[in-house]
Amino acid sequence: MSDCLFCRIAAHEIPADIVYEDDEVVAFEDVNPQLPVHTLIIPKKHYAHVGDGVPEETLGRVFKTVEKVAALKGLEESGYRIVANTGEDGRQTVHHLHVHVLGGARMPIRMGPAD
Ligand code: 5GP
Ligand code: ZN
Protein backbone atom coordinates (compact mmCIF):
# COMPACT_ATOMS: atom_id res chain seq x y z
CA MET A 1 0.00 0.00 0.00
CA SER A 2 1.81 3.08 -1.25
CA ASP A 3 -0.01 5.45 1.14
CA CYS A 4 0.80 3.40 4.25
CA LEU A 5 3.63 4.82 6.37
CA PHE A 6 4.89 1.46 7.59
CA CYS A 7 4.69 -0.12 4.12
CA ARG A 8 6.92 2.74 2.98
CA ILE A 9 9.35 2.13 5.85
CA ALA A 10 9.38 -1.59 4.97
CA ALA A 11 10.18 -0.66 1.36
CA HIS A 12 12.95 1.73 2.52
CA GLU A 13 11.12 4.63 0.91
CA ILE A 14 11.00 6.46 4.25
CA PRO A 15 14.09 6.31 6.47
CA ALA A 16 13.95 4.55 9.82
CA ASP A 17 16.53 3.40 12.34
CA ILE A 18 16.33 -0.30 11.52
CA VAL A 19 17.29 -2.72 14.28
CA TYR A 20 16.62 -6.00 12.48
CA GLU A 21 15.32 -7.05 9.07
CA ASP A 22 14.77 -10.28 7.19
CA ASP A 23 12.65 -11.39 4.25
CA GLU A 24 9.37 -11.07 6.14
CA VAL A 25 9.74 -8.56 8.99
CA VAL A 26 11.39 -5.25 9.91
CA ALA A 27 12.13 -3.93 13.40
CA PHE A 28 12.87 -0.22 13.77
CA GLU A 29 13.06 2.44 16.45
CA ASP A 30 9.88 4.31 17.31
CA VAL A 31 10.29 7.97 16.34
CA ASN A 32 8.69 9.05 19.63
CA PRO A 33 10.05 6.64 22.25
CA GLN A 34 8.04 6.17 25.42
CA LEU A 35 10.80 4.31 27.26
CA PRO A 36 14.60 4.00 26.78
CA VAL A 37 13.94 1.06 24.44
CA HIS A 38 10.96 1.46 22.13
CA THR A 39 11.19 -0.66 18.99
CA LEU A 40 8.42 -1.52 16.54
CA ILE A 41 8.16 -4.83 14.70
CA ILE A 42 6.14 -5.08 11.49
CA PRO A 43 5.53 -7.66 8.80
CA LYS A 44 6.65 -6.34 5.42
CA LYS A 45 3.31 -7.30 3.93
CA HIS A 46 0.41 -5.01 4.82
CA TYR A 47 -2.17 -6.11 7.39
CA ALA A 48 -4.19 -3.50 9.25
CA HIS A 49 -3.86 -5.22 12.62
CA VAL A 50 -3.63 -8.59 14.33
CA GLY A 51 -7.29 -9.34 13.45
CA ASP A 52 -6.86 -8.75 9.73
CA GLY A 53 -6.53 -12.38 8.62
CA VAL A 54 -2.80 -12.50 9.25
CA PRO A 55 -1.37 -15.96 8.44
CA GLU A 56 -0.10 -17.91 11.45
CA GLU A 57 3.33 -18.08 9.87
CA THR A 58 3.51 -14.29 9.69
CA LEU A 59 2.29 -13.85 13.26
CA GLY A 60 4.89 -16.39 14.32
CA ARG A 61 7.65 -14.49 12.54
CA VAL A 62 6.59 -11.19 14.10
CA PHE A 63 6.53 -12.65 17.60
CA LYS A 64 9.79 -14.58 17.16
CA THR A 65 11.32 -11.23 16.23
CA VAL A 66 10.39 -9.97 19.70
CA GLU A 67 12.97 -12.41 21.06
CA LYS A 68 15.60 -11.15 18.61
CA VAL A 69 14.93 -7.49 19.44
CA ALA A 70 15.04 -8.23 23.17
CA ALA A 71 18.46 -9.84 22.72
CA LEU A 72 19.78 -7.03 20.52
CA LYS A 73 18.59 -4.45 23.05
CA GLY A 74 19.83 -6.32 26.13
CA LEU A 75 16.36 -6.78 27.60
CA GLU A 76 16.44 -10.54 28.17
CA GLU A 77 17.22 -10.32 31.90
CA SER A 78 15.36 -7.14 32.78
CA GLY A 79 12.18 -7.92 30.89
CA TYR A 80 10.00 -5.74 28.73
CA ARG A 81 6.43 -5.18 27.59
CA ILE A 82 4.98 -5.97 24.17
CA VAL A 83 1.91 -4.09 22.99
CA ALA A 84 -0.20 -4.29 19.85
CA ASN A 85 -2.69 -1.42 19.87
CA THR A 86 -5.66 -2.53 17.80
CA GLY A 87 -8.39 -0.38 16.32
CA GLU A 88 -10.20 2.62 17.70
CA ASP A 89 -10.52 1.69 21.36
CA GLY A 90 -6.97 0.34 21.30
CA ARG A 91 -5.82 3.80 20.12
CA GLN A 92 -4.04 2.38 17.08
CA THR A 93 -2.73 5.32 15.04
CA VAL A 94 -0.80 3.57 12.26
CA HIS A 95 -2.99 1.01 10.57
CA HIS A 96 -0.29 -1.48 9.61
CA LEU A 97 0.15 -4.33 12.09
CA HIS A 98 2.96 -3.55 14.53
CA VAL A 99 4.14 -4.77 17.91
CA HIS A 100 5.75 -2.31 20.32
CA VAL A 101 8.69 -3.63 22.36
CA LEU A 102 9.10 -1.37 25.39
CA GLY A 103 11.85 -1.67 27.98
CA GLY A 104 14.98 -0.32 29.58
CA ALA A 105 13.04 1.01 32.57
CA ARG A 106 10.31 -0.29 34.83
CA MET A 107 6.96 0.14 33.15
CA PRO A 108 5.07 3.15 34.51
CA ILE A 109 1.93 2.38 32.57
CA ARG A 110 -1.12 1.02 34.35
CA MET A 111 -3.72 -1.03 32.57
CA GLY A 112 -7.31 0.15 32.65
CA PRO A 113 -9.89 2.39 31.03
CA ALA A 114 -8.96 5.85 29.81
CA ASP A 115 -9.35 8.76 32.20
P1 5GP B 1 0.20 2.96 17.46
O1 5GP B 1 -0.30 4.16 18.20
O2 5GP B 1 -0.47 2.82 16.10
O3 5GP B 1 0.17 1.69 18.24
O4 5GP B 1 1.75 3.21 17.24
C1 5GP B 1 2.28 3.89 16.16
C2 5GP B 1 3.68 4.25 16.56
O5 5GP B 1 4.37 4.66 15.39
C3 5GP B 1 3.77 5.42 17.56
O6 5GP B 1 4.45 4.98 18.74
C4 5GP B 1 4.56 6.48 16.80
O7 5GP B 1 5.47 7.18 17.62
C5 5GP B 1 5.27 5.68 15.72
N1 5GP B 1 5.50 6.41 14.50
C6 5GP B 1 4.63 7.23 13.85
N2 5GP B 1 5.19 7.72 12.74
C7 5GP B 1 6.44 7.20 12.68
C8 5GP B 1 7.51 7.34 11.73
O8 5GP B 1 7.42 8.05 10.72
N3 5GP B 1 8.65 6.66 11.99
C9 5GP B 1 8.79 5.86 13.11
N4 5GP B 1 9.97 5.24 13.26
N5 5GP B 1 7.79 5.70 14.00
C10 5GP B 1 6.64 6.36 13.79
ZN1 ZN C 1 1.14 -0.97 5.37
Image (cartoon, helix red, strand yellow):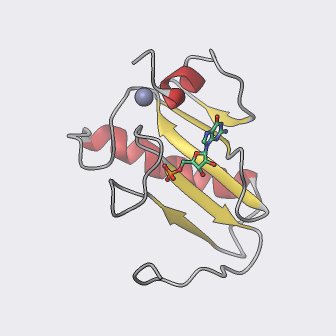
Residue 106: x %, y % from top left: 71, 81
Q: Is residue 44 left or right of residue 30?
A: left
Q: Residue at x 43, y 52 (%)?
A: 92
Q: Is residue 18 left or right of residue 41?
A: right
Number of disc labels: 0
Residue 38: x %, y % from top left: 68, 56
Q: Residue at x 47, y 42 (%)?
A: 94
- The image quarter containing residue 36 is bottom right
Q: Is residue 67 above or below residue 53?
A: below
Between residue 13 and residue 23, name the one nearer to us: 13
Q: Residue at x 35, y 55 (%)?
A: 86
Q: Is residue 12 above or below residue 47?
A: above
Q: Is residue 7 above or below residue 80?
A: above
Q: Residue at x 71, y 30 (%)?
A: 16
- The image quarter containing residue 59 is top left
Residue 41: x %, y % from top left: 54, 44
Q: Is residue 89 left or right of residue 27?
A: left
Instruction: Give the quadrant of the N terminus.
Output: top left
- The quadrant where ligand 1 appears is top right
